[in-house]
Image: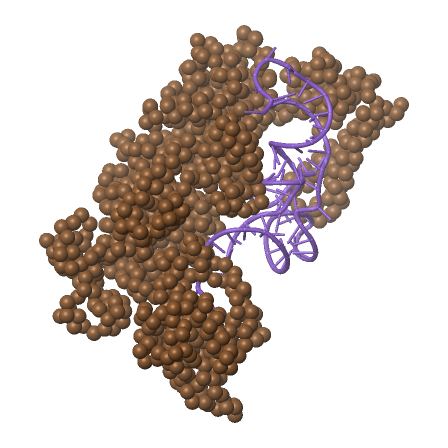
Chain colours: A brown, B purple
Amino acid sequence: MAEELSKVYEPKNIEQQADKIWAAGNYFHAEPDSAKRKPYTIAIPPPNVTAPLHLGHALNNTIQDILIRYHRMLGLNTLWMPGTDHAGIATQTVVEKRILAEEGKKRTDFKRDEFVARVQAWKDEYEARILEQLKAMGCSCDWQRTRFTMDEICAKAVRATFFKLFKDGLIYRGKRLVNWDPATQTVLADDEVEHETIQGNFWYLRYPLTEPVIIEGKRVEYVTVATTRPETMLGDTAVAMNPNDPRAKILVGKSVRLPIVGRIIPIIADEHVVLPNPNSEDEKAKFSTGFLKVTPAHDPDDWAIGQRHKLEVINVMAPDGSISDKYDWKDWEQIKNPDVENLIGMDRFEAREAIVEWFRVEGLLEEVRPYAHEVGHSYRSHVPIEPYLSDQWYVAVKKPIDHLEAKFGKGMIDGTDVPVNSLAGFALKPLLDGRLKFNPERYAKTYQSWLENLRDWPISRQLWWGHQIPVWKREATERETSGTLIQDTALDGGILTMNNVEVFSQTGWEKGQKYWFECPPPGHPEVERELEYLGGEQDPDVLDTWFSSALWPFSTLGWPDESPALKTFYPGDVLCTAREIITLWVSRMVMMGQYCCGDIPFKDVYIHAMIQDGEGRKMSKSLGNGIDPLVAINSHGADAMRFTLASMTTDTQDIRMPVAQMTLPDGRVENTSPKLDVGRNFCNKLWNASRFAMMNLEGTNPASFDKNKLAITDKWILSRLARTIDEVTAGLDAFKYNEPLNAIYKFFWNDFCDWYLEWAKPRMADSAQKPIAQNVLAFVLDQTLRLLHPFVPFITEGIFQKLNELVPTRGLKAIAELNSVKALVIADWPRQIDALINEQIEGQIDNIQTVVRCVRDIRSRCNIPPSSKLVVSVNAPQDISGILNADAGLLCQLANLKEFSASDSAGKPKNAAAAIAGSMQIYVHDAIDVEAERKRLTKQKEQIEGAKKGVEAKLFNENFISRAKPEVVAQTKEKLAEYTEQLNAIEKHLAELDG
RNA sequence: GGGCGGUUAGCUCAGUUGGCCAGAGCGCGUGCCUUACACGCACGAUGUCACAGGUUCAAGUCCUGUACCGCCCACCA
């Protein structure tokens, strides 16, 4: 005899038990198989090893696990690739902070490899915690394949990709303005810059003309520039004005003497300059004087202008943001004077004040106007970002790749400047062709517009934690330097053969010195040693963390090796992530997938909501409003957490989780959410209903089932099950989560538990009925567990195991047979059983339920104890009466009646309470609370009158009759008839009460 | 500045292509330890669908505008 389920639902036990079964069967592991099952692949968005997972991860991974488990049950060869991301700057930052706080040491107090070892230790700790968390959530990842973006396999892909890009001329060294954080002295990626609104000023500074001019009869001695950053004026190398400015004719070509510095700089014409217009909506036009100071070294726009006009680039700042002559202040020797020297060493904000003061004293400060504007701040140090000139590696994203023309075509994508055979084109084209789909669709727009406006991708970072750039730099010899200096970018390149290996090289100039940048292919350390022997040194910088992330879908499968796994599981199927990394990550994976593997890495992108707290704020450590998934699992169970998260997942972009503190069983007080009760309550219900079912399933024999003996309630629950299977399957196929879960919830709780189980109770004591009821019960429970399994895997697996012990073979002979299977995780997804959908039966049961509810309502209102048995009669049309009489037992059971009858001529007995529902009038005999009855009937009368009025208004409207769909009109007429009849009945009953 | 979303019951949210008297869970009220479940059962109450216009026989649903909340993107004149 099988052991009974424990009386109380204990998530912990069930979770451990299921884990054991899954591990023993190795069900999560995927191999290319000889059976040629269709593969189904999802690569996990590798969580950053910066911190343990939060509730957002729980949502993300729950959704992926639902998809994975669903497709596994559909019989696909399913791979969910797990792993973690080294998260370059983020991880380095948290480790630096920790070391500073605990040991008072800075990064620079360590040798590079020592520091990296510290970060590595952090990574090991958090990687382990993260993987534990994923397992605790029930994620059915192929743990044997667990990867890390910096492990050997991924590193190999990084090297291979970098080399390929370098060889194809897509990687170049460029001098550009980068987002510089003067506090931590590193470059930041665009996404690491946070924009904040700053209440600043526009300062209007006068720059004297070297020779006064006459404009419209007036003598003009200076031009006025407006700036928010006066301190950068030390590096001005031009003043620009719009060529359409009427004054341009006279002024362009003239020059000004830069105050303080004394540098003579030209007035140039550039379309970029906004014409002044005080009445304009445009802030810039409103504040513009028509003259723009141009500081190529300290402003991205000005850099662009400088490039167009070949302006001198003068950097006046040190890396720490102070004014300095030591960092490429090209004309320092010529211009130095006491006024400038006075500013050297000042912080940029100090210098700003000093310079403004200088202008004021000299009478050159024309005006100061307050101005609110967005300023980029470092997400690490929170100081304003300094656009800073530096040498960085870039990936050319819009450069056509000639040798891929044959595969991808050539020319621009319509309406864009994106070549089909460029990296950006690789990512954009599949979307436009409909091969790549976003769910919800609206997110495609983010992806598309980002790619259409893409700039080259800076990939070098001044960090220690990451993939070190595989380029060796060495000074060119004098002979090699004999070319002409054109500009500070890559000039030429070539191939040199070393040890029979082709090494690709570029040249570049830095501070007047020519260098070779040489990139050897991966797997040739001897060549790297050789390059070092020649005086080369590996670039100390590391790659942007997104570089390795971009390769994730195939690096994890062993690319560039043509492994069987790669062949089977690439391209994958779905990517599931949050919207914030559509551009940074999703687009780059598509780009690199196409470039490296010749195909897109997934067909569907599912973008899920962001979890906020009850007030609509982001969950964050600093606000203390986050919920740790492990706490949720501890307090409510993993299944409960998954259930709640899935039930909240709709197509909206945010979901709110009210946060509340709660004392855990172990005494800790932690954040959880009352929303988790929803899931826990459901699991508890599932547990108990299953327990009850199994108490009655002993000795179930499928052979004793006879489909001709099905009771009406059996047919009804099977019909409802059939619909639920359809609904859940369709929902999951359409990336819906809340809809299918809701469908099962309603089916299971409201149909199965509330009605079917209740009706089944007495049948279990009836030897004729028992075999039928048992088989149906076992079948419905089995199918329900399967439908629920992707959402709540632990509890369903646990119950399934018990069910297997008790009723090893389930199925309905000649209706739906089932194969036995050892574990639910690999069981077949429920097959469609649409033949069992029976509208007529559902209608009949609906009438029966209505009568039961009406009787219960009257019982409750008239204060009739639940225990007293009642006599009920019903007046209803013949067909309905017939059904009610035939199934009077069902009514008597759930409404607790001793006598029931129905006919089309039944009148209301004296002392009876009446209820009206559809075409039925329900009389509860001897319920003699006249006042309660009058109140109830009067209220219902008002309701029906209101409804009738609305219907009448429609029918009196000729436009409605003539223009609305005929079936709508017919329906409305029927309604009117029904209301009229109901009203007559109610009025009659009311009159009787008075009489 | 550009783009996107939200505003429906006290709370958290559903509401498919416009069509019965707008739904669920929680909470609330009343009554129940009915031999699976009090993390439960039964019954009930609760809405100016943000606001203003428009289209339509018919609008929570479509269009225009406004307000508020939030997110993403953007080179600080």
Q: Position of residue A900 (x, y in %)?
A: 71, 15
| Residue reaching furthest to the top | A767
Quarter occupied by residue A502: bottom left
Q: Is residue A399 left or right of residue A530?
A: right
Q: Nearer the viewer, residue A165 or A510?
A: A510
Q: Nearer the viewer, residue A11 or A790?
A: A11
Q: Which image quadrant: the N terminus of chain A?
A: top left
Q: How many marks?
A: 0
Q: Is residue A841 left or right of residue A971?
A: left
**Residue A907 can be seen in this image:** no
| Residue reaching furthest to the bottom | A217
| Residue reaching furthest to the left | A499
Q: Tell me the residue at 50%/36% (across/down).
A: A645
Q: Tell me the residue at 39%/29% (across/down).
A: A73
Q: Position of residue A116 (x, y in %)?
A: 29, 47
Q: Which image quadrant: the C terminus of chain A?
A: top right
| Residue reaching furthest to the right | A995
Q: Position of residue A893 (x, y in %)?
A: 65, 15
Q: Tell me the residue at 24%/50% (across/down).
A: A159
Question: Above or below — where is A128 with respect to A218?
Answer: above
Q: Position of residue A358 (x, y in %)?
A: 47, 77
Q: Is residue A888 left or right of residue A520?
A: right
Q: Tell me the residue at 30%/61% (across/down).
A: A392
Q: Nearer the viewer, residue A669 or A691?
A: A669
